[in-house]
Amino acid sequence: MKNLSFTLLLFFLCACQTNSQAIANDNIAIQAKSTSPAVMQVDLSVQGHTSTLHNMNITFLGQTIPYTYSDGKISNSRGYDWWVSKHFALKSDLPKEKVTLYLELLEMAYPHYVSLFGMEPPNIERQRIAVVYGSSRERVREAMLDDGFLRGVHDTAGGETMFYNRAGYNFPSHREHHQRYIVIHETMHAFHMALNGHSTWAPNWITEGLADSVAHHVYDPKQKQLTVMVFDRAPMNYIETGLKQYYSANKPTIEQINDDPTLKRGLNFFIIHYLLSSPERAQYFAYFVQQLRLANPHSEATLSTANSLLKNTFKDWLSIEQGFADFVQNIRPSFHLVSGPWEQNGNAYWLRNIHSTELSRLDINPANKAEVSHPIIDFPVPMPNPLITLSANNELAALIEFETAQLHRGAIGLALQGKISAENQHYRRTFIGKEQANNDQLLTLLVVDGERLALSASNTKGFNNQQIAFTPELKQAIASNAMLAIKLSLNATQQQLTVMLSAGTTNEPVIQSFTAKLPHALFTELNTRKISLLSKNNNHKITPYLFANKTNTLSSDQLNKITNPWLFKGYAKLNRLFITCQTYSVQLKNCQRELAILIKQLNQPQRHSAIRAALPALVKQYQTTLGDTGFSPLSGITSGVYYHQGNPFLRVENPSDLNLTLAANVDFNDNNGELLNSQQLKQVLTPGIHNIALENVNNTNTLMIKQTLNWGELSQNSQLNALAIPFDGVQMQLTQLADVHENWQFDLSLSGPYSGETTGELHLKTLNYHSLTTPKALIKKVNIVPYQQQNYHFSVPISNDKTLVEVTALLNVDGEEIRLVEQLSL
């Protein structure tokens, strides 16, 4: 009876365990389904380089490793958890609010990543880009060790994206702006690698230039608005970095920068912005990047390939070089950080740390648009504020947002710039020499301790420093709303300055105003477009309002995820016409001249409707002339074999506005090329991306797809050849073979990288499970080239005891030191 009871109890426990396991599996399935990229939402408005986030899904996965482009090459780490959004998977030990911020930033940046490379990573509908963001350099190094890397990020880097697993590793610096910058920058590299497995097909000025340019951003946390590709901004100002590098290197050309592998961030930044600053150059640049990606050179051939393609793509290379020289020498940055650790949120500026005695200064001098060819303060203007109304060129204003705990200490305000010394003017043009900021003439207005305003003038004769106390009513309004508006007006007739201080609510504003007579020599130098922001001993925010800044009014067209800076709705179709013209310029006589006329008009919004109306006729004309040979560039349709969870599928992208008919025969062949099975495909594919499942046939080594595509009046016959198992860079697999002559036999397969060489050693050793032994390692040298697969054979004596066989690979993969381990239990 006892045995029967025990048996029933055991059965009951097993049934409960089985049932619990089934419930757990169901929960995992539900979680996997709910976190699928296809069902997770991101609601964005995109206007040019600015994304505004309305809503998005973020899901906590804990220790569940999501499916990413780093699959099998990224692991869990102590204290880290996984979070996912639609396109990204973030592994982090940071608090939830930081994780949320970084995933929001990346989703806002994603449309711009796609725009700059002209494509999305294959399988992004079901696979994510992996990002690691640790709380410190040491914690990031720990995560990298967990993933097999034998070092952390480089000593001078704030983050690094690794070739081996295509994951970006980031850690926060003390600069808040840089904390956002680094994750946008490194994830751009990971996006780049996800396109075709690696990034070394492009030279430094593209890989780093694009990543730095897209991360050169302005972020407004109140509006959840990110502007990327910002040329003219304040903190981490790459304009000034680039000018220093340009003049110190004796004005290098694009070709010289391309051929020099040394990282020069500012120069790379200049090339990218120059090539993208005109609609015509932007088309050529996109075509050049596409051709370079398709050429897919190994790292040692990247510079020469890029150099050759540049000159073949841009028809008049000498004029491109001259234009670049003119572009750089014409640059006039609006911002100059004289002193202080300034941070920027939207249009508000503040100090990151607190100095009780040092007055930090940030100069803002927007150039006249007629004098420069580059963007000026190219991010959204301040939101309207009821306390500030500007109506004339002689007016400017600033809005101060106080940190309430610091209201009664420190100073914050602005200055009108008078005469800048000749030496300092030269320094700001070339950044050669040294700046003497104390020699500049400033008319300064500082709010001191939240109680008074101090007016002073440096390097000026005939003006006594003065102060005025805030009225009790104004102080009460400031205390209630933690906000103060300062409006300045210059009266040329009376040569005086009028200051109006405003606080409180729209319905009941409290106003205090006064005037100050200024010396003639000072007044004649002042200009409301030449100001300085000043602060010390506080974290208050100050937002300048310049007369030139007007509120943004966005049309419905501009909110429709239009990522080109000219906000042209037909940009994709225009790009396909451009590529067709470049490919078949001999057959399409005069196409380059005709398209150049249209493309140059993109700078004129009033011409956009006429340009769009002209495109269908050009498509028809090109179709008639080229016939089926123009299928690919005119339609933009691409078809290729890619992999999901290691299984091949056919991915067809139809970016046009017409349906596509696909008819294909898929052959599954074994190692000897013998046919194992065939699959017939016949589908009508609407505009968009289609992932078409292929059969799973055992022992398949290669796939051959013969396809016919029909689009409009055009058709194309083509053949695709692919491996059944995906190539994924450096990978290692240990296999036991049949025993021979009382020896265990093992084969180890090792694949090479995407680019560069891989060297190192393989160490095989055997360990007994039940007794101590002195392991002796069999060592084999490794030297493997890209895309190569090598097999290594090991033979060890058979042991009567249970044995563990372990192979450790210590490799240098294109400059990255990694450790891989494979084990078998015998």
Image (cartoon, rainbow, N blue to C red):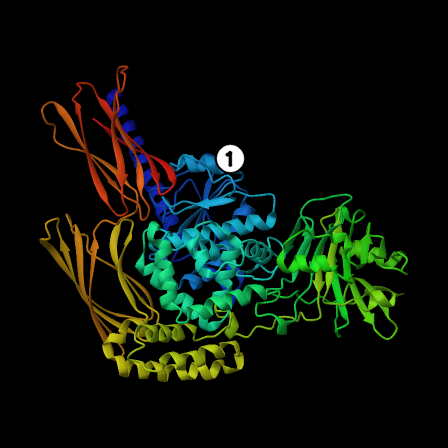
The residue carrying mark 1 is 138
Q: Quadrant of residue 11?
A: top left
In this view of the protein, can residue 657 be seen by the observer?
no
Is residue 327 depicted above or below 789 in this figure?
below
Q: Quadrant of residue 595?
A: bottom left
Left or right relative to 666: residue 136 = right
In this rendered view, identify the residue nearer to me: 452 or 185. Answer: 185
Q: Residue furthest front?
A: 250
Q: What is the count of numbered marks?
A: 1
Q: Position of residue 164 (x, y in %)?
A: 36, 43
Q: Position of residue 580 (x, y in %)?
A: 33, 74
Q: Amino acid at mark 1?
A: Glu
Left or right relative to 165: residue 680 = left
In this rendered view, identify the residue nearer to me: 760 or 642. Answer: 760
Left or right relative to 195: residue 385 = right
Where's the C terminus, which quadrant?
A: top left
For numbered disc 1, what is the local secondary structure?
helix
The residue drawn where x is 22% and y is 43% is: 789
Q: Position of residue 787 (x, y in %)?
A: 26, 48
In this view of the protein, can residue 623 be seen by the observer?
yes
In this rendered view, identify the residue nearer to me: 211 or 659. Answer: 211
Where's the N terminus, which quadrant?
A: top left
